[in-house]
Image (cartoon, rainbow, N blue to C red):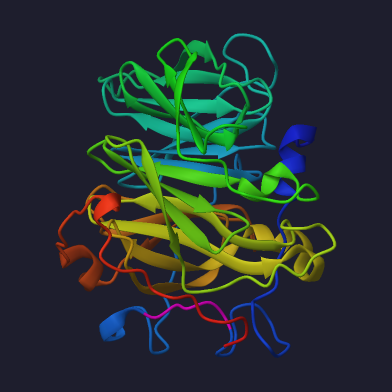
Amino acid sequence: MRWLVPVALVALLAAGGAAWIRSDAGSPGSGTGGPVCALPGGAGGGGTTLSAAVVSEASDLALPTRLLVHDPWVFVLDVVSDSVLHVFRLDDGALVQSLGRRGKGPGEFWSAWSISFDGQFGDAWIYDISLARLTEIVVPRDDTRPVYAGRSIQLAAQGLATGAAWLDSTRLLTPGFFRDARLAVLDGAGLRVGGIGQRLPHGSDTPPQVSQARIALHPNGHLAVLANRHLGSIELVDLDRAMTTTVQGPVTLPHGSAIPGLDDIAYVDVTTTSTSIFGLFSGRSVSTFGQRASYGDCIHVFDWNGTFEGGLRLDGDVIAIAVTEDGSAIYALRHEPRPALVRFDLPVVRVARQSPLLRPGHLQRHHPASEPGS
């Protein structure tokens, strides 16, 4: 049985669409007017496209939306199937378990929005945006026992939280829509104890969803990145200094829309390693491509200094990405021609690279964005 997508989830997903930022007509991803997708030195560029290897097309997959890779598992959220969470083996792609009933009771999910990893205890956490609830997914150390839903935490972020990531065993970091901060910091009980950065400026006629972003942490837990859905920029977050730094990406969005700020879609997902930030880029508009704007086939690569290093072209649209811990591959969720978990092996240059880690407050340079259609 396939469920209707909850209204709250539709409202946020609907703030997306799809048309490449280019001066001439054409299909997404074609021609020279599409998003920047070429790495320096030729890796991933010069006509090279990363090809997807299908990991699983399990019949249980209905409308997968988010994923988390943590050896030996791949966790996949699904907003339509009977079960909210599917657990795959990383080594062979086998589906080993599906769990999570639809509902609002303990251990149930209504609008599963994001999934993150708790480095302190080795468990996954699902954030339900409609219930403002974070639920632990306990991963037994003995892989012969099943994964199961554990305790839940009700978040009181003093605003709409759109995600949650554990900084340590006592602190949560949540992006969202807040009056006085860019991100909220919560204690282990889900109560707000502080904020980081300033709310993005926008006019009175601009809906708050313009500041919607996906979040990913640096493995050391001292840095984070926000990939902005409706702005062609990322924001580096220095958690020790409680400050954010905005870095303009390589493509400027035109913001020509009857719905101010929401027509153009930039980054739809983000994933990180200790050296790199990978932002899944759409560059499309809702008014032209409708729901296809929530997908991307280009990954913009930055280092933790904020330097744009180039792009990776994928051989088809995906809706979510997650990089392996060693940086050798990116797993992704594809909806066409059928729902699938796929893998893209990264160019050797991405695996071998060892760039220095610099704090966002020490950014050396920003790369100017290209003009629309350039």
Using the image as rendered, state which of residue 155 and residue 81 is in the foreground.
155
Give the x, y percent position of residue 129: 63, 28
> Taking 51 as reference, is 338 above or below it?
above
Decide if residue 324 is on the left or right side of residue 6.
left
Compared with 259, 224 (above or below) is above
Which residue is rendered at x = 62% and y = 32% of the image?
Answer: 179
In terms of image quadrants, where is residue 319?
bottom right
Q: Which residues are magenta?
A: 34-38
Splitting the image into 4 quarters, where does residue 136 fall? top left
Which residue sits at x=51%, y=12%? 152
Quarter of the image with the C terminus is bottom right
Quarter of the image with the N terminus is top right
Residue 345: image x %, image y %? 32, 65
Left or right: residue 333 versus residue 323 is right
* Residue at image point 26% right, 23% down: 120
Residue 4: give x, y in percent of width and height: 79, 35
